[in-house]
Image (cartoon, rainbow, N blue to C red):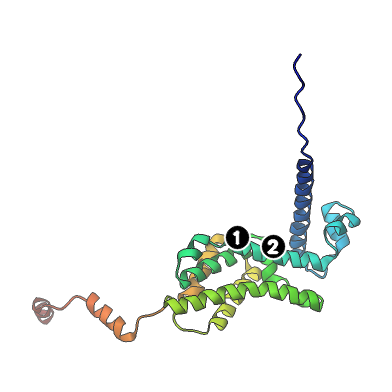
Amino acid sequence: MKEAPKRAHEPWKAFQARQRNQDIKRDAVLQTAAHMFLEQGYRRTSMSELARRLQITKPALYYYFHNKEQILVECYRAGITLIETLLDKALVSRGTGLTKVKAYIEAYAKSVVLYDFGRCVAMLDENELSPETRREVRALKRRIDASIRGYIEEGIADKSIAPCDAKLASFAMSGAINWIGTWYKPSGPLSGVEIAGHFTHLLTEGLHARTSTTSRHRVIARATPRKTSATKAGKASR
């Protein structure tokens, strides 16, 4: 008589399954909240309405988040993480400072035009929050500015970027990308990826390190064909 196979005791698998299920539900709350914040505004979105949209009870919603401010902070956190995830790690690890700025700008722009979490970072107003939560959100936003500014400074050091005020340049770039969220329409003539590409080019073209005026004149002189005597004679006969 064959011995019955022993059943493996793996209680952690059941726990992992429950944990995954909780993570999925929590993520669903965040995604729905982000969409509602963008659709009707943070202030006009109540926890009761969010619970109805999710088709869960209000106590169930409070199981995942203590209050609406915590949800907004997590939306910001998810947006910043998204930008960093979209960033091309290969370019950042090997490129010049200018290449890294381009990669970051493109990742940031894509997050705004393609994802609600990225659009939350660009569009939602943290002034409606309590002072403590506002400080937390602004600290998260500073991660974007610090990354762009650091890459600009790196580009100035490696001479791929012309000398400039890195702080002002990073503010200008972030401000321009954040504004995309106010006018971008998925049904427009350009796709989100195309808009990200155009903005990357427009916002970084002015950073390129330029050759001096004398050097440019030399380049132009080398590229211009010399006038031969035959050419001159031909012009004289016309």
Indicate the position of residue 171 as horizontal and vertical percent values.
59, 79
Q: Can residue 208 be seen in this view?
A: no
Horizontal arrangement in the rendering, residue 170 relative to residue 57 (left or right): left
Indicate the position of residue 62 as horizontal and vertical percent values.
87, 59
Q: Disc 1 or 2, which lies upstream in sequence?
A: 2
Examine the rendered structure and indicate whether residue 6 appears above or below residue 89. Answer: above
Q: Residue at x 56, y 83 (%)?
A: 168
Q: Mark 2 points at which residue?
A: 78
State which quarter of the image contains the C terminus. Answer: bottom left
Indicate the position of residue 160 as horizontal and vertical percent values.
42, 75
Q: What residue type is labelled 1?
A: Thr
Badge 1 density bin: few <14, some 14–19, many ≥20, Cα 10 Å: few
Q: Which residue is drawn at 46% across and 83% down?
A: 163
Q: Residue at x 55, y 60 (%)?
A: 193
In terms of image quadrants, where is residue 38? Answer: bottom right
Examine the rendered structure and indicate whether residue 21 appears above or below residue 82. Answer: above
Badge 2 density bin: few <14, some 14–19, many ≥20, Cα 10 Å: many
Q: How many labels does the image show?
A: 2
State which quarter of the image contains the N terminus. Answer: top right
Q: Can residue 95 be seen in this view?
A: yes
Of 14 and 121, the residue lying toward us = 14
Examine the rendered structure and indicate whether residue 219 appears above or below residue 193. Answer: below
- Regarding mark 1 in the picture, which secondary structure is present there? helix
In terms of image quadrants, where is residue 159? Answer: bottom left
Horizontal arrangement in the rendering, residue 121 relative to residue 150 (left or right): right
Q: What residue type is labelled 2?
A: Ala
Q: Name the residue under label 1.
A: 85
